[in-house]
Image (cartoon, rainbow, N blue to C red):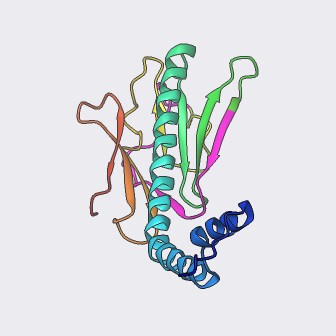
Amino acid sequence: MRPSRQSNSPRGAARRRLGAGAFTLIELIFVMVLLAIGAAMVAPSMAAFYRGRLLGSEARRVLALVHYGQSRAIADGVPVLLWINSKDSSYGLRLPSTETGGDGPATRFTADSTIKLDTPATDTTAVSEQDEEKLGLTDGLPVIRFTPDGFYDESSVRKITLRQGDGNENALEVVQTANRLGYEIRPATAN
């Protein structure tokens, strides 16, 4: 019997180790195809997830501006207006200026182009306590009016609807709470 020839050299052992653990090109292509198929199946769900996050983020920003406007009215002791423009989906605060007699610094935000703001029509017009002025709003925009004591005027908008797309499936509302002391976010109801 002949003894078998096995190489005990370090190079031979290194070659055997490299060949045993490596992937072939076919195996790598197969794995890449499986990853591409998985990504294609998950992409629509992820897009809907990000759209929903954008809508929720915008609703939280509107609610934060409501709270900020209420705080500024209390802190400054003057009426503050939060206006909503449905045509270009913008909203902001209008603060009165005591030094100049006109409008003070304004805070303005514009919603993402996929989000539309909507407010129902109110029965009353926002006027001052003495009924001698229209509070500086000549545009006829719907407003939430914060009085100096932190409450909302009767002429204030009771609901702001934020819609993404058509229908109510992608819609949230910023509405007055049941006790009428604040606003909250909730899913949109059918009109």
**Does the magenta segment cover residue 125?**
yes
Q: Is residue 185 above or below residue 113?
A: above
**Does the magenta segment cover residue 102?**
no
User: In the image, what residue occupies the spot 71% across and 23% down?
Assistant: 101
Magenta stretch prevailing secondary structure: loop
Q: Give the range drawn in magenta.
A: 106-132
Query: How many numbered discs, if any?
Result: 0
- Where is residue 62? Give x, y as percent: 50, 42
- Where is residue 36? Give x, y as percent: 54, 77
- Where is residue 83? Give x, y as percent: 55, 43
In the image, farthest residue toward the bottom: 26
Residue nearest the viewer, comparing 58 with 35:
35
User: In the image, what residue occupies the spot 46% across and 42% down?
Assistant: 60
User: In the image, what residue occupies the spot 41% across and 44% down?
Assistant: 157
In the image, farthest residue toward the left: 178
Residue nearest the viewer, comparing 189 with 7:
7
User: Which of the 4 image quadrants contains residue 154?
Assistant: top left
User: In the image, what residue occupies the spot 44% across and 60% down?
Assistant: 49
Residue nearest the viewer, comparing 145 with 16:
16
Where, quadrant-wise, is the C terminus in this rendering? bottom left
126 horizontally vs 91: left or right: left
76 horizontally vs 105: left or right: left
- Where is residue 31? Give x, y as percent: 54, 77
123 horizontally vs 24: left or right: left
Residue nearest the viewer, comparing 16 with 10:
10
